[in-house]
């Protein structure tokens, strides 16, 4: 891709995100979302592969539909209340439509269909952007409108997202699709607590971004796209592969790793709100995700490929590990003892 075009797309991506997260008017938030959509499309389709073109077309159509619904919801609210302020969402139809529109933007069930396919057709770096930064503006809109959103609809979508994200990830052999369904399951955890403690949603989102970014950067360093090639990566950078296992277990939410913190806090808050059944259900559904994280970890560090594998074993490379990757891995694994400080900051 042309460096100038890459620079323009990246700067537009940062601009659109900044506009949306800093706006308090529905129109400026919508403009930021549109800039984001148009900026990411060249990055998705830059490989000129038919699958990449298909992914960019699916992404454009889905995001355009969500933006139209969001604009329609804000116009209905302005028509009846005279308010364009994001936090002044009062009309019931506007609340429901905006919940659906932001859910489409994020990829919550039942509007998740586009997300795994788009990630599968993109490069690993673009997948990292789609799974992290591109979710920041919709999560911000969720945070700002949380008192007005339809709580029943949110809880239903959260439970089904946790269930389907874990269930559909069980039989995947592509690492990008595994991480796509992992993202859907984590969105379920973020959404279920939104009405009760929006700050906890943001903490969960930040820790999810940190851990997922570390995993994507590790996969990009080792050039791993399938489970069958995960088995051969241990010969390239053995220490990184071992740390990859710990990062996966952190994403699964096992103590004493960082990923346990948001799940612990969410279950605690749901119990305080006397939603013990909901807390139990989403905790049990997280076991589905734990299975495919363990499967990835097993393939990466414990098992060896059979002798008749079609993939050549590669000897250790001298490719240095990115300092950003090292920092994110450290935070993804060792942040749990600092949880009182995290809660104080939030």
Image: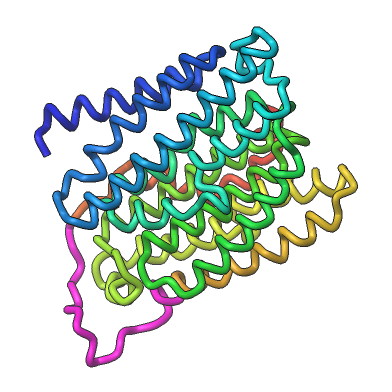
Q: Looking at the image, which is closer to me, 192 or 217?
A: 192
Asked if residue 152 shows in the view, the reply is yes
Residue segment shown in magenta: 298-318
Residue at the spot x=57%, y=68% of the render? 167
Tell me residue 196's x, y (percent): 78, 36
Q: Is residue 301 magenta?
A: yes
Is 195 displayed left or right of 183 in the figure? Answer: right
Q: Which quarter of the figure is the C terminus placed in?
A: top right
On screen, residue 155 versus residue 77, left or right, reads: right
User: Is 109 or 125 nearer to us in this picture?
Assistant: 109
Q: Position of residue 100 (x, y in %)?
A: 59, 39
Residue at 63%, 24% (x, y): give it.
Answer: 144
Q: Is residue 49 magenta?
A: no
Residue 62 location in percent, x, y?
41, 42
Residue farthest along the left direction in this orientation: 2
- In which quadrant of the rendered image does the N terminus lie? top left
Q: Quadrant of residue 24?
A: top right
- Above or below, 179 relative to 97: below
Q: Is residue 256 visible?
A: no
> Residue at horizontal 56%, vertical 48%?
108
Q: Main secondary structure of the magenta part?
A: loop
Residue found at the far bottom of this picture: 307
- Name which residue lies at 42% across and 52% down: 114
Q: Position of residue 123 (x, y in %)?
A: 26, 51
């Amino acid at each position: 891709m042309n460096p100038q075009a890459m620079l323009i797309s990246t700067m537009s991506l940062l601009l659109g995100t900044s506009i949306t997260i800093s706006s308090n008017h529905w129109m400026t938030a919508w403009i930021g979302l549109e800039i984001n959509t148009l900026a990411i499309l060249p990055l998705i389709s830059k490989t000129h592969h038919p699958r990449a073109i298909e992914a960019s077309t699916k992404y454009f159509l889905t995001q355009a539909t969500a933006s139209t619904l969001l604009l329609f919801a804000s116009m209905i609210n302005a028509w009846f209340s005279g308010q364009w302020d994001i936090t002044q969402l009062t009309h019931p139809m506007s609340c429901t439509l905006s919940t659906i529109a932001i859910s489409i933007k994020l990829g919550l069930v039942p509007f998740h269909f586009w997300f795994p396919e788009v990630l599968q057709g993109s490069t690993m770096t673009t997948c990292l952007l789609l799974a992290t930064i591109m979710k920041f503006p919709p999560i911000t809109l969720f945070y700002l409108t949380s008192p007005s959103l339809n709580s029943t609809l949110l809880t239903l979508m959260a439970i089904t997202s946790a269930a389907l994200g874990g269930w559909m990830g069980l039989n995947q052999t592509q690492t990008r699709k595994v991480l796509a369904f992992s993202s859907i399951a984590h969105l379920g955890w973020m959404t279920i607590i939104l009405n009760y403690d929006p700050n906890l949603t943001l903490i969960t989102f930040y820790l999810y971004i940190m851990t997922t970014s570390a995993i994507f950067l590790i996969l990009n360093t080792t050039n791993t796209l399938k489970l069958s090639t995960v088995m051969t990566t241990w010969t390239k950078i053995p220490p990184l592969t071992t740390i990859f296992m710990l990062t996966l277990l952190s994403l699964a939410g096992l103590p004493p790793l960082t990923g346990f913190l948001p799940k612990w806090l969410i279950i605690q808050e749901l119990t305080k709100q006397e939603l013990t059944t909901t807390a139990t259900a989403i905790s049990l559904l997280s076991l589905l995700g734990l299975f495919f994280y363990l499967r990835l970890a097993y393939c990466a560090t414990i098992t060896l490929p059979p002798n008749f594998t079609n993939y050549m074993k590669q000897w250790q490379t001298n490719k240095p590990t990115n300092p950003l990757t090292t920092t994110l891995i450290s935070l993804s694994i060792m942040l749990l003892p600092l949880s009182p400080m995290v809660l104080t900051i939030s």
